[in-house]
Image (cartoon, rainbow, N blue to C red):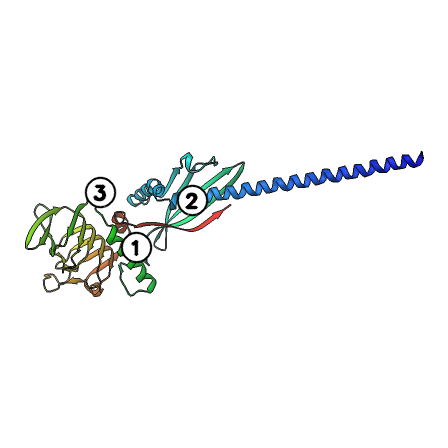
Amino acid sequence: MKRNGSITIFIMITFSICLIISYFSIEVFYTQYLIQLASQDKIQSDLLSESKIMILLEDKNIFDSMIVPKIHDYFRDQIRNKGFDVKLEDNLVVDDTYKKAKGNFYKEEGKLFLELETSTRYRGIRTDITAKASVINDIFELDNSPVISYGFSDEIDQLLKEYLGFVDENISNNNLSNVLKKIYTFDHEVVKIEKGSNDLKNIIKIRNGTETVETFEEELFLVMKNELNIPTKLIIADDIVFSGVLYIEGDIIIESDFDFSGIIIQKGVDNSIIVDNTIKVDENKRPKISGIVLTEGNTSFIEFIEIVYESSCIYKYGIYLPRFLQPKILLIKKY
């Protein structure tokens, strides 16, 4: 009987030990399971936060509709419109209860940057994220140089070639401000800008000996296309003050001490910007360009023109050029 009792006690002790081990094993496995779930939820939360940044900056439709208007506001007033808020639509951030993002524009070493901040709330886990992105196409912010041409470096040469090729195929005078005068010419041998009457400027277009005249006040978006590859030239004849964008597939002949603010793009390696000093009357004055010049031709004109890199002029008119805004994510921090 004593032996049977000892066996019973042993079995009970063994069973209890096994039960305890089983309980702790279950606890360990369950804890590991919870940790794994939490880890997966954290990863998912991180991915959702990153996806919001990607959507805002890399989805063209979202970027154009939600961020570009904020960029335009900043260009109009760089003091008041540095910061902004955006609200994401529900279908863009599924499973995330936080639908907002904050943005802030700032300049660093002459370049414009955008800082975006947002958070994710996913199954009780929160991820905060900050991203730094450049905003403007690099070709317009190369060391704040007022003239970009071939010969700086292989990298810049490639940037210039690619951008001018893209502009050639995509430049358009659609969706321009009503303030800008839109002039789009094809294969005109000469386009001449000169003083008109009543403070207006005349644009004289000559093709096959036939002249047509249009006028504008201050701001001009001029595109001179040369599909037939014939000698073409833009002549600036009088001491006029105007601004905007000049895209020229031909020579630019400067016969005056004009004052221009904005962007000049000259396409064609055989084309030049020529300052005709024989016509100038006042030797103490020089033509002035505030903004930037992108040219495939030679740059000998630099010594005859006062050229100043002016970001405000570039921002104001660059928004009308294709691929001027080209956001690029440089840094992402999660915490």
Residue matched to label 2: 53
Total numbered labels placed on residues in the image: 3
In this view, the residue in front, 41 or 1, is: 1
Q: Is residue 80 visible?
A: no
The reply to whether dot 2 and dot 3 touch (C-beta < 8 Å) is no
Q: Which mark is residue 140?
A: 1
Q: Secondary structure at mark 3?
A: loop
x, y percent for residue 75: 30, 45
x, y percent for residue 45: 51, 41
- Tell me the CA gap for discs 2 and 3: 30 Å
The numbered mark, 3 or 1, whose residue comes first in the sequence reads 1
The reply to whether dot 2 and dot 1 touch (C-beta < 8 Å) is no
Q: Secondary structure at mark 1?
A: helix
- Tell me the CA gap for discs 3 and 1: 21 Å
Mark in front: 2 vs 1: 2
Residue matched to label 3: 177
Look at the image and tell me in which quarter the N terminus lies: top right
Q: Given the current orientation, which residue lies at the most extreme right position? A: 1
x, y percent for residue 246: 20, 53
The residue located at (85%, 38%) in the rendering is 10
The residue located at (28%, 59%) in the rendering is 161
Which amino acid, by three-letter code, is at mark 2? Answer: Ile
Which amino acid, by three-letter code, is at mark 3? Answer: Ser
In this view, the residue in front, 283 or 27, is: 27
Which amino acid, by three-letter code, is at mark 1? Answer: Phe
Q: Given the current orientation, which residue lies at the most extreme left position? A: 209
